[in-house]
Image (cartoon, rainbow, N blue to C red):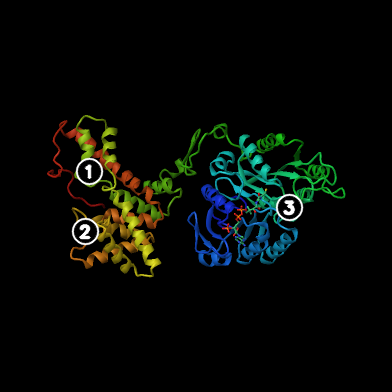
Amino acid sequence: MAILIDDTKRVLIQGITGREGQARTRLMKEYGTKVVGGVTPGKGGQAVLGVPVFNTPREAVDALGAIDISVLFVPAAGVKDAAISAIDAGVGLTVLVPDRVPVWDAMEIAAAAKANGGRFLGPNTLGALSPGKGVIGMIGGRAESARAWFKPGVPAGVGIISRSGGMASSTGYYLGQAGVRISTIVHIGGDAVLGLRIPEAALLFEADPQTEAIVVFGEIGSSQEEELASLIREKRVTKPVIAYVGGKAAREGTRFSHAGAIIEGGRGTHDGKVKALREAGATVVDAFGELPAAVVAILSHRKGHSLMSDAERTAQWHTALTQIEPNRVAVRGYDIAQLMGRASFGAAVHLILTGELPSAEVGRLMDAILVASIDHGATPPSALAARTVASTGASLSAAVAAGIMSINRHHGGAIEDCAKELAKIAARAAKDSLTLDDAATKHLAAMKEAGDRMPGFGHRYHTKDPRTARLFELAQAAGVDGAHMKAARAVERAFAEQKKPLPINVDGAIGAILADLGMSPSVFNGIFMIARTPGLVSHVVEEQSREKPMRRIDPVHHGYDGAPPRTLS
Ligand SMILES: CC(C)(COP(=O)(O)OP(=O)(O)OC[C@H]1O[C@@H](n2cnc3c(N)ncnc32)[C@H](O)[C@@H]1OP(=O)(O)O)[C@@H](O)C(=O)NCCC(=O)NCCS
């Protein structure tokens, strides 16, 4: 987990069509934030970077469903109305990036949030960033640099709360350099009236199981650090707090960059804050440069999981597939020794390709897909290519690679292409309010007129592919029957109306099933390669052991002399 933002949160951008709104939406999307919609009054119906724009947050919620967070890039004068309209539409968290928002407006936003059980961050905030999960606002700049600077808090990380925007990023950067992972960085904003303040942010981190310690970049003015000290004394914040308080040299009455950073009547002084925090048990460093080492020392002492190994710290790039440590191999987080004997190969293929283990039924379905494609005799181009190369005296790897290289758009590629056409048919039915049968008929007619063939239907050999019916049966048993499989049946019905019925073939069936499983079409050809490799290895080994080198391979005329038909008991 993390706080405020993670990869499940659905985000709206208010002011999305403006200069900053557009630029930041691109960066947020690139970092992985789920931006589902935008709002600019009078610009509803447009799209920015593929994100639909609405006139109001209410319209957005009506069209898109519940929205968790709205980030505002609306000039200060419009912030109050924009924020309250988001709160009224049920958005749980509004992030007020703009500066110069009038104090009175911020107070009205606070009242509206309180009345609706909502929460806001800012104003004048750079937002929040949970490494590897998402960013709301402006922290970290380019996605590439944010990825390089802030290390994901997995299995655990420290939470950063900063009263300074620039120092929010810098604190994350220097902690990353020191080998510390981060759960979330929050910049609470520098104004006098704020939504989420240090104490509230600390309580969120206290409740977050992924956060091991809380790092605070404080400054003079307000009573936030003192309130945090009270929470520590009352044991409502029990995780280690490591803080730096800026403004040591500021005299009373000096405004220290932010509106909220002012010492008045002896309150909010640097010394008072440091004393309160230290007396409560927090670690307070005298210089910012001492902060990373202090955090590392505390985590090391507690044997915290937020510290990276040396190898991780010096890593130049990352992979999310498999973690190798001495005496441990973990695929997508699962110990391989635990997977072995418990997860089938099909389930493991699903795991490595999608990141998640499937249900037992879907695992069986994945196995069936792999079995269905294991071999199709000696005539397919991949088998012929592998045998031809094998007959030259090439190595097993070279001959199998030749077979794999012939798997392409017209051999195995129908899986992906068919899924794409079925998706178009389902989308057309939804968009034009047509039945799937009508959408399929219209789509096939358009394809015919364009001189295209529907991939995944008909077979040069089989009139009723024995693998297709079994795959659909297993899919139904696994509860898989989504838009693609329904569209496939509609296409079959549309073809049945024609003179020469074209039943769905194994490629089409696999494409429809994999798409209904939610897998990305970009891996479909790969699944065919994974499935066909054992067949290709067998062809190469048989060619090398049974046949003479450089023989002329007849692509059609060959017999079968293997095991007679037999059944599984
Ligand atoms: C908020 C801010 C970023 C906007 O700047 P900008 O993007 O240059 O402003 P623009 O005028 O280009 O865009 C604002 C958009 O909001 C839109 N807008 C106005 N009222 C709106 C409302 N109620 N709801 C949604 N959008 C609204 C405007 O129509 C405009 O879009 P348009 O250009 O398509 O018409 C800027 O005013 C600001 O406050 N900058 C400082 C932020 C900062 O640094 N904060 C953190 C400090 S640590």
- Measure the alpha-carbon separation of dots 2 and 3: 71 Å
Question: Which residue is labeled 2 in the image?
Answer: 464
Residue 443, placed above or below residue 390: below
Label 1 amino acid? Pro
Q: Residue 87, how many percent across, how many down?
A: 64, 64
Question: Which residue is labeled 1 in the image?
Answer: 381
Say whether disc 1 or disc 2 marks the residue closer to the N-terminus. Answer: 1
User: In this view of the protein, can residue 368 be seen by the observer?
Assistant: no
Say whether disc 2 or disc 3 marks the residue closer to the N-terminus. Answer: 3
Q: Nearer the viewer, mark 2 or mark 3?
A: 3
Residue 215, placed above or below residue 429: above
- Measure the alpha-carbon separation of dots 3 and 1: 69 Å
Q: Quadrant of residue 531?
A: top left
Q: Nearer the viewer, residue 413 or 12?
A: 12
Q: Residue 514, how many percent across, how many down?
A: 36, 54
Q: Residue 127, how many percent across, how many down?
A: 64, 50
Question: Which residue is labeled 3 in the image?
Answer: 191
Q: Residue furthest left?
A: 557
Q: Secondary structure at mark 2?
A: loop
Tell how many labels.
3
- Measure the alpha-carbon separation of dots 1 and 2: 21 Å
Number of other residues with Cα within 10 Å of mark 2, as a class: few under 14, some 14 to 19, many 20 or more: some
